[in-house]
Image: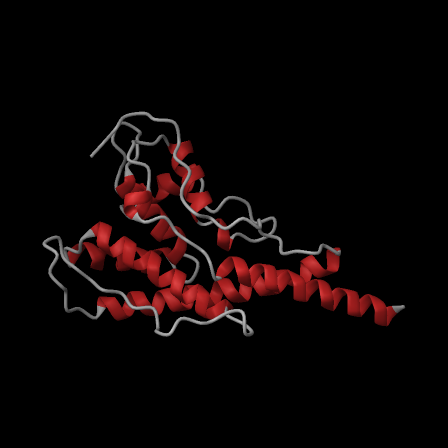
């Protein structure tokens, strides 16, 4: 009887891992141009960020970001202050980056990293898109298993450009790449360890939703911005 239970648990874990791997090798984080072109209220910002980063949620973890967290980031000058309590795509990028990197770095280190990006006069849209693409690549590489999953042929690479579109020669690209690889590895370990809870509970699939995130959900229109 015990052997049958062990076999059943092992089978459930295998199925859960495959479901998880399929999800993680097809993650899409919305690029800057795909984010809502409207000003958001705080609750809309929180919902959007939680949706974008749902792939790294853990069972019973709660929301990845709260209103008090955002207010604290603003007070610490990690995230730009909202204008009349409204947030733009620029704010979304900052909050997403903070939520990602604080998984592997202290908030002080995240602050310094963001400061370096600002001091290098990097193009925000380009840098954010590069970060999203690099993380997707790193996650796909971490979760690639078996003949049905093919790991990326290249390591995640960050191409830094300034606001004029000129390539920036800086060690910051390697720093961001290392942080992204570390983050992907941390997510892999957390998610795979969580599969033990799934198997123990007798659930046939991974704890995360089966639908891959394709694009951010656009909240109700408030004020259009450019």
- Image quadrant where residue 140 sits: bottom left
Left or right, residue 91 beside residue 207: left
Residue 206 drawn at (x, y percent) = 62, 56
Residue drawn at point x = 29 percent, y = 47 percent: 32
Residue drawn at point x = 55 percent, y = 45 percent: 62
Quadrant where the N terminus is found in the figure: bottom right
Residue 118 drawn at (x, y percent) = 19, 54
Left or right, residue 26 beside residue 84: right
Answer whether residue 75 is visible to the viewer in this image.
Answer: no
Q: Residue furthest top?
A: 222
Q: In the image, is residue 179 above or below residue 206?
A: below
Left or right, residue 146 beside residue 203: left
Residue drawn at point x = 56 percent, y = 74 percent: 146
Residue drawn at point x = 64 percent, y = 60 percent: 16
Q: Nearer the viewer, residue 68 or 87?
A: 87
Residue 172 drawn at (x, y percent) = 23, 66
Q: Nearer the viewer, residue 7 or 2?
A: 7
């Amino acid at each position: 009887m015990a052997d049958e239970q062990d076999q059943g648990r092992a089978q459930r874990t295998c199925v859960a891992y495959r479901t998880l791997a399929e999800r993680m090798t097809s993650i899409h984080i919305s690029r800057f141009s795909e984010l809502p072109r409207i000003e958001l209220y705080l609750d809309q910002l929180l919902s959007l960020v939680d949706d974008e980063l749902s792939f790294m949620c853990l069972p019973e973890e709660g929301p990845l970001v709260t209103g008090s967290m955002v207010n604290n980031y603003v007070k610490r000058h990690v995230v730009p202050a909202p204008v009349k309590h409204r947030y733009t795509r620029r704010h979304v990028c900052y909050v997403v980056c903070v939520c990602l990197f604080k998984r592997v770095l202290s908030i002080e280190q995240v602050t310094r990293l963001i400061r370096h990006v600002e001091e290098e006069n990097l193009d925000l849209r380009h840098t954010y898109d590069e970060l999203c693409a690099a993380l997707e690549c790193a996650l796909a590489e971490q979760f690639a298993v078996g003949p049905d999953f093919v790991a990326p042929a290249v390591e995640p690479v960050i191409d830094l450009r300034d606001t004029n579109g000129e390539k920036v020669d800086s060690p910051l690209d390697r720093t961001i790449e290392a942080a992204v690889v570390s983050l992907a590895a941390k997510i892999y370990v957390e998610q795979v360890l969580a599969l033990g809870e799934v198997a123990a509970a007798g659930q046939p699939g991974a704890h995360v939703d089966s639908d891959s995130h394709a694009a951010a959900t656009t909240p109700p229109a408030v004020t259009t911005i450019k």
